[in-house]
Amino acid sequence: MVGDRGVLGIGMVGYAFMGRAHSQAWRSVGRFFELPWTPRLAAICGRDRAAVAAAAERLGWAAWETNWKRLVERDDVDLVDVCTPGSSHAEISIAALEAGKHVLCEKPLANSVAEARAMAAAAERAAAGGVRAMVGFNFRRVPAVALARQLIAAGRLGPLRHVRGAYLGGHALDPELPLIWRLQADQAGSGALGDLGAHVIDLAQYLAGDRIAGVSALTETFVRERPLPGGGGGRGPVDVDDAAAFIGRFAGGALGSFEATRVAAGHTEGLSVEVNGALGSVVWELGAFNELRLFEAAGEEATQGSGRSRSPGPTTPTPGHGGRTGTASATSTPSPTRCATSSRRSPTAATRSRPSPTGSRCRRCSKRRSAAPRRAPDGRRSARDPEVR
């Protein structure tokens, strides 16, 4: 539990890619948002004494540990941030919750259904004492995504018919990528489905305000052997999926289709979600981080979708406490959310412009706005995947 000192002491387990990303967030969040407590980077934990000591100094942590149990026991740690491979998520998170520490756990939550249920039960027990637990589904906090959820909840799209989601990456396209922990089931639990698909599934259910009730799925491992780490010349089997695709039905009746892959050439972080309703649709793409595309079917066919563009205003939802309207906390530079409408061509509107990948113009904004690139032209792997946390 948080004490009366006005400080939230953070203890983090793991210090590679996700550890660096979370460290940056903890260091900077209080400088941008108005928070009820001041985060303090109390201690970081890793098994390699020299490496974790160097990470603590580089990332700004006050102390370091080589045993996560000692980190959980520290009096100056109020929240445990779990940035380890999935094989240790359950043990660390449950122990921290039972010790009265808040928990932020990276996704995917666990390596098995049994572990996930045990973690959820521990979180429910801890919640009775005011202890919070959450999973790192950070894309929920993007203002454009929050706006989409608000529109859907308000009924702007009508009854939902379809939800489509995809996370396309080329992180494991190279067959000579070493057999890192992300490619081993005993450590990662799953492959593209858990690593990338977890974000898609969470966003789909979050936006729809509904749960997936049934699925039919396919998975495939295209590269079945990879070089062992260390360069010794040996190779080992890959026992997680490179790609997964499934269809599903939501409890409310909407149909869903989903795809996650690490072997899509030309893509790096190709996350997108689309929701279609009886009265309209919304589309959000990670490559156009601060843009939400909205189509509304009301009115005559020639004017459907027109006149709906909106610039940021006081009602644009924002994550966290305070901060500029329409600002994404996940970015280093503030950026306003914009809502671009889709214009459909018809015989009476043949010259109407439609949004393009290179930019769009809003009626209420006189400035040309260029969307961010949506894919890397060379399909290079993201720097995050070869890392061993």
Image (spheres, rainbow, N blue to C red):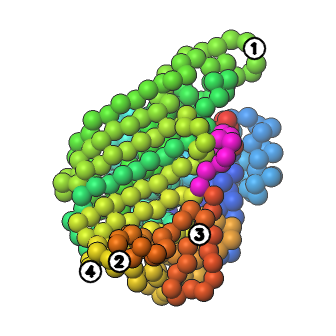
Packing grade of label 4 (10 A; few <14, some 14-19, many >=20) is few
- Three-letter code, disc 4: Gly
- Which of the two marks, 1 or 4, is nearer to us in this view? 4
Q: Is residue 75 visible from the viewing direction of this image?
A: no
- Three-letter code, disc 1: Gly
Q: Residue at x 68, y 56 (%)?
A: 23
**Location of mark 3 (residue):** 359
Going by the image, does 283 lie left or right of 159?
right
Q: How far is the residue under mark 1 from the one under mark 4?
A: 67 Å
Q: Tell me the quadrant of the picture where the C terminus can be found.
A: top right
Q: Is residue 255 visible from the viewing direction of this image?
A: yes
* Vertical side of 325 occupied by 370: above or below: above
- Three-letter code, disc 3: Gly
Front position in the image: 180 or 380: 380
User: Where does the magenta region start and end?
Assistant: 374-382
Q: How far is the residue under mark 4 from the one under mark 2?
A: 14 Å
Marks 1 and 2, the one that precedes in the sequence: 1
**Location of mark 4 (residue):** 299
- Which of the two marks, 4 or 2, is nearer to us in this view? 2
**Location of mark 2 (residue):** 348
The percent position of residue 344, horizontal first and vertical second, equals 38, 69
- The tag on residue 232 is 1
Mark 4 and mark 2 residues within 8 Å of each other at the beta carbon:
no
Going by the image, does 315 lie left or right of 64?
left
Going by the image, does 215 lie left or right of 104?
left
